[in-house]
Amino acid sequence: MRTAFIQQLVTEAINNPKIFLIVGDLGYSVVEPFANEFPERFLNAGVAEQNMTGIASGLAMQGYTVFTYSIANFPTLRCMEQIRYDVCYHNLDVKIVAVGGGYAYASLGPSHHATEELGMLRSIPGITIAAPGDPIEAKAITTLLSNTYGPAYIRLGKAGEPVIHTNNLNIEIGKPIEVIKGVGKCVFTTGAMLKYAYDHINHNKFSWGLYSFPIIKPLDKQAVSEVVKSYAEIVTLEEHQLSCGFGSAILEAINDLVEDGSLQSHPKVKRIAIKDEFISIAGSQQFIREKAGLIL
Amino acid sequence: MSLSSITFAKEIRKAVLKLVYEAKASHIGGALSMTDLLAVLYSEVLHIDPKNPLDRDRDRFLLSKGHACTALYATLALKDFFPLSELSNYSKDGSMLLSHTSHKVPGVELSTGSLGHALSVACGISLAGKRNNNNFRVYCLVSDGELDEGSNWEAILFAPHHQLSNLTLIVDYNKIQSFGTIDEVLKLDPLHKKFEAFGWRTLEIDGHNHDQINSSLARAKDETEKPTVIIAHTIKGKGINFMENKLLWHYRSPSAEEFAEAIKQLEE
């Protein structure tokens, strides 16, 4: 996903001279194509994420569309107040990019488990939150957000994620993507859980539907409503804490839809997410996901 | 309005006193300590057109110690960035004049109130100015207490590395922070040596002496390789004798009697 992101960012930057990339001393063997192509629009801010985000704000005030890039919790939790107060309150065109969403860096331990940031960021006004499910989604999200003014967060996986979608996508803000048309039960995923859900449904020859949500904020509630109406049961699956994350966002949207009359009744919703715990043993991403109960 | 910077500073102090008194607000001590710095900046140094405060070529001034906003609001109103009459709404229901610096106010670049934010943003603006060969200069005024914030030291490390000579940092060094003196809470001295060791051109002045303020800012403009820091030794509550160097006036709002006495002193 990170390779798809950087390749697409280079493409966008060719056409848009205002795109600027700042890294927090990370991105070795990934960001060089951008750095070499656009040295005047590249900066390594050092291991200093608060300053990196403040600098991004200053550059954005001068008209740049600034991408900050680091791994796991460093570009988000470490500088959450700069994101809230400098970037979002001033409505600046800063896109925060984290590689290693969820348990992508599983064996590195909780320091590198990015499993709370969606919830923390989701409560900040005005920020768009994206978590692409495969490299095709990552590419489309990069294009979309490069051309959409305002604060945004992009949660990427790591590297080597398989491609799920067969064609290039045109992602719209807040709209889910139908991956498998099914009956009865429908699985909603965000981020890199897409591959697991896709394989699980196909391997077991289930008749379930599958939707990927590359953007979890804002959600297009009417689009959610259309999907929900077609299924008896919804299962949300995310590599994030149960509280405040993707499943919570879906539940909130459904509740609002029932409240305003768009939905006649509240469908059954099962949320699969991390149950308020840290996982402090080593293991592969798949192993840690299973330990955390992220299985259908 | 055209005033010498010393007369201007007196007008700012009177306006600050009225704002804090009428709103029963806090932070008058830190507003008065930086008043002379603002008076010189806005009357003699900054190139900002009050009628066109978003002009792309303007100098940028970022007040990091947002709690001392009364002095900046008074300065901007006295310089016609917005009507003086607006000041009477300070901190009242529905007013744009929040009691921490708000970017919704004409002339204010950045909202501040959480400490340790503005210097990084100033570095970003300075970097953009450097890379685009812009002529504007960037000024950031921080309190001494907020140098406790690690984020400031990230920025202090950054600016010399990138040779941000278009950046001037001013430290309002009044030696008193929120819950004690600087020496009691977290020592900053030798501050001059710290900045020098980080690679800054470091100047040290009496932050109430307008000639020294003016000449140090002029020297900063001549620097071509390093960012400049001006460590301005100031007095918390400067200009009102019973407020000077008193921690109490980080919080306290004057009573009617104290207000009358303070006005008398400022008009002398």
Image (spheres, coloured by chain):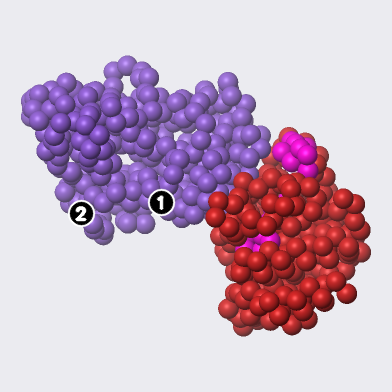
Q: Do the residues under discs 1 and 2 have CB atoms within 8 angstroms?
A: no
Palette colour of chain B: red
Mark 2 nearby-residue class (10 Å; few <14, some 14–19, many ≥20): few
User: Which of the pair A228/A12 is nearer the observer?
Assistant: A228
Query: Which of the marked residues, 1 or 2, is nearer the chain's N terminus?
Result: 1
Residue carrying label 2: A275
Please give the label number shown on residue A40. none
Q: What's the amino acid at mark 2?
A: Lys
* Chain at numbered mark 2: A
Give the secondary structure at mark 2.
Answer: loop
Which percent across, then down, holds residue A59?
A: 63, 40
Give the secondary structure at mark 1.
Answer: loop
**CA gap, disc 1 and disc 2:** 19 Å
Residue carrying label 1: A73
Write the start and end of the magenta stretch as one range. B50-70
Residue depicted at 79% across the width and 73% down the height: B263
Q: In which quarter of the image is the C terminus of chain B?
A: bottom right
Residue depicted at 72% across the width and 68% down the height: B17
- Relative placement, left or right, of A247 versus B231 is left
The image quarter in which residue B169 lies: bottom right
Q: Is residue A82 magenta?
A: no
The image quarter in which residue A203 lies: top left
Q: Residue furthest top?
A: A167
- Relative placement, left or right, of A263 versus B180 is left
User: Which of the pair B134/A23 is nearer the observer?
Assistant: B134
Palette colour of chain A: purple
Which percent across, then down, holds residue B234?
A: 77, 72
Q: What's the amino acid at mark 1?
A: Asn
* Chain at numbered mark 1: A
